[in-house]
Image (tube, rainbow, N blue to C red):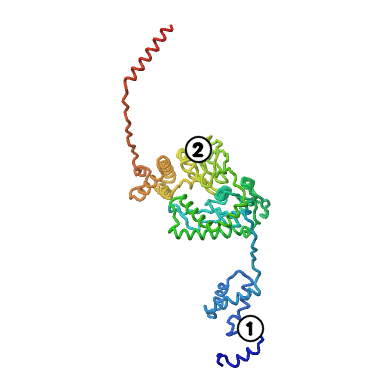
């Protein structure tokens, strides 16, 4: 009684062998009626048919099927019941097997889409990917921006990562992208490395290795760090106060700082990896590929299933092309005759109206049915001008004047012609080619002030004396 213990409780403890370990009675009774007892067979059928459904979705389905039967406050109880059912009767879940990693052995490479980061360059959205490489023992990572999952992108990405390390791991692991592998059978099962990818791995002395088809978890380290890297970039963008960059160079510098910060905490394990890795080869691979192609009679060349227009003076000639991730340089001999923007895709055409407009002005009838006709509207305002010309002058005359308008843009400046079109189209008067010409800024050339040299007449005396001495020497010899 002095201890504040009732007689009944004290008697219970006296009957125990160890008073410090009281027995626990299993709680196998309900404290309130089960509100889901009559609908639980229905719930089991739903969970069996679609095991991936969340408890919240199933609860919302029950509410819609049984109006007024369930309250929002019963959601927690329902989620607990679903969790208990899955633990006893649900399907087996995926098991993750942690691996023992050896320092300096494996580097994994993967691409991740970075468009979701909202990066813009000069106010224009910049859709791109990151070629991401990771050492799986230390989680040291490096990434470079690229436009596609191409061999050039992976070459630039792996070379940037290895150059930053100064060392080379033994194994290079990548997924079954077309940059690294190609299909051996039509069923899509077995794939083999491309010759160019094998040559790239051999240059650095790495053993290429790929994962099984449809098993991205085998590249789990880089797959996991893809998400962590983009989350880190978002945080740095918030600290920076915006995701717009004035140039690609500034964006590259931003990525450099993000990656350096991420790798700062991995220095100890990275040192273990570098100690057992081999030296980097002394030679550097170019960031381009070269192909020889012949210019077709349509004044186009075909690069990786994409057509590109070139100046018509090259028709019939075989030219050398230097292809990088963002541009194509066309060489005739040693000279660069034109530079084209690189577009990634499996079909299509990149037509510069400046390459074909002179010939179209000479053959205006070819414009209506030309397969690349839409390429001759370099901006929306040109399409507006075309529609106004056809509406006012008719199809044939309107198309002819529009071609002359494009020729004017090719001979002067596309930007100036666009500004003149905006001014004329918004004016109240009739729109015409001549009105656009008059709206262009006048082209005036500032006179160049050439300094007039002052001749020294004594130079002429020296010249005459030299000629006289030469004549006297000739007479003496005779």
Task: Tell me the residue that label 2 is attached to.
Answer: 336
- Name the residue located 35 percent from the left edge and 15 percent from the top edge: 464
Where is 449 relative to 77, above or below? above
Structural distance between the alpha carbons of marks 1 and 2: 89 Å
Task: Tell me the residue that label 1 is attached to.
Answer: 21
Residue 369 visible here: no
Where is 388 relative to 311, above or below? below
Where is 228 relative to 478, above or below? below
Helix, strand or loop under label 1: loop
Residue 463 horizontal/vertical position (percent):
36, 17
Point out the residue furthest to the front here: 2
Q: Dot 2: within a 10 Å radius of its alpha carbon, few (fewer than 14), some, or many (20 or more) residues?
A: few
The front one of 140 and 223 is: 140
Mark identifier at residue 324: none
> Which quadrant of the figure contains the N terminus?
bottom right
The front one of 196 and 170 is: 170
Residue 137 visible here: yes
Residue 9 horizontal/vertical position (percent):
60, 90
First of labels 1, 2 by sequence position: 1
> Which quadrant of the figure contains the C terminus?
top left
Quick check: marks 1 and 2 in contact, CB under 8 Å?
no
Q: Dot 1: within a 10 Å radius of its alpha carbon, few (fewer than 14), some, or many (20 or more) residues?
A: few
Within the image, what quadrant is residue 85 found in?
bottom right
Residue 320 horizontal/vertical position (percent):
55, 38
Describe residue 279's horizontal placement relative to residue 467 as left or right.
right
Residue 425 horizontal/vertical position (percent):
37, 49
Describe residue 110's horizontal placement relative to residue 402 as left or right.
right
Helix, strand or loop under label 2: strand
Where is 430 relative to 215, above or below? above
């Amino acid at each position: 009684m002095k201890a504040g213990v009732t007689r009944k409780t004290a008697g219970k403890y006296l009957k125990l062998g160890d008073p410090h370990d009281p027995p626990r009675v299993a709680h196998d009774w309900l404290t309130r009626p089960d509100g889901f007892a009559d609908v639980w067979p229905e719930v089991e059928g739903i969970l069996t048919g679609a095991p991936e459904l969340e408890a919240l979705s199933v609860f919302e389905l029950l509410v819609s099927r049984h109006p007024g039967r369930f309250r929002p406050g019963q959601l927690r109880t329902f989620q607990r019941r679903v969790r208990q059912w899955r633990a006893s009767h649900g399907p087996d879940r995926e098991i993750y097997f942690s691996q023992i990693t050896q320092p300096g052995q494996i580097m994994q490479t993967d691409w991740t889409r970075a468009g979701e980061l909202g990066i813009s360059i000069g106010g224009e959205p910049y859709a791109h990917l990151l070629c991401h490489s990771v050492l799986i023992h230390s989680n040291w990572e490096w990434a470079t921006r690229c436009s596609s999952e191409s061999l050039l992108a992976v070459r630039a990405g792996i070379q940037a990562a290895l150059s930053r390390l100064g060392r080379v791991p033994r194994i290079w692991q990548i997924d079954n992208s077309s940059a690294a592998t190609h299909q051996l059978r039509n069923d899509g099962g077995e794939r083999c490395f491309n010759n160019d990818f094998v040559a790239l791995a051999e240059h650095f002395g790495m053993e290429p290795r790929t994962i099984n088809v449809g098993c991205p978890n085998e590249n789990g380290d880089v797959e996991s760090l893809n998400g962590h890297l983009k989350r880190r970039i978002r945080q740095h963008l918030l600290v920076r106060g915006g995701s717009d960059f004035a140039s690609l160079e500034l964006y590259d510098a931003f990525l450099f700082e993000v990656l350096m910060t991420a790798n700062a905490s991995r220095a100890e394990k990275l040192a273990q990896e570098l100690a057992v890795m081999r030296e980097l080869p002394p030679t550097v691979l170019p960031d381009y590929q070269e192909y020889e192609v012949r210019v077709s009679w349509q004044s186009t060349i075909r690069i990786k299933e994409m057509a590109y227009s070139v100046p018509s003076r090259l028709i019939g000639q075989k030219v050398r092309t230097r292809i990088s991730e963002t541009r194509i340089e066309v060489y005739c001999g040693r000279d660069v005759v034109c530079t084209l923007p690189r577009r990634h895709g499996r079909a299509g055409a990149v037509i510069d109206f400046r390459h074909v407009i002179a010939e179209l002005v000479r053959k205006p009838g070819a414009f209506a049915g030309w397969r690349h006709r839409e390429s001759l509207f370099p901006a929306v305002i040109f399409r507006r001008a075309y529609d106004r010309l056809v509406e006012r002058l008719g199809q044939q005359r309107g198309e002819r004047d529009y071609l002359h308008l494009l020729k004017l843009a090719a001979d002067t400046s596309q930007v100036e012609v666009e500004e003149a079109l905006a001014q004329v189209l918004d004016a109240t008067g009739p729109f015409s080619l001549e009105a656009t010409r008059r709206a262009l800024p006048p082209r005036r050339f500032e006179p160049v002030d050439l300094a007039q040299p002052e001749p020294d007449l004594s130079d002429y005396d020296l010249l005459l004396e030299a000629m006289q001495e030469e004549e006297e020497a000739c007479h003496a010899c005779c």
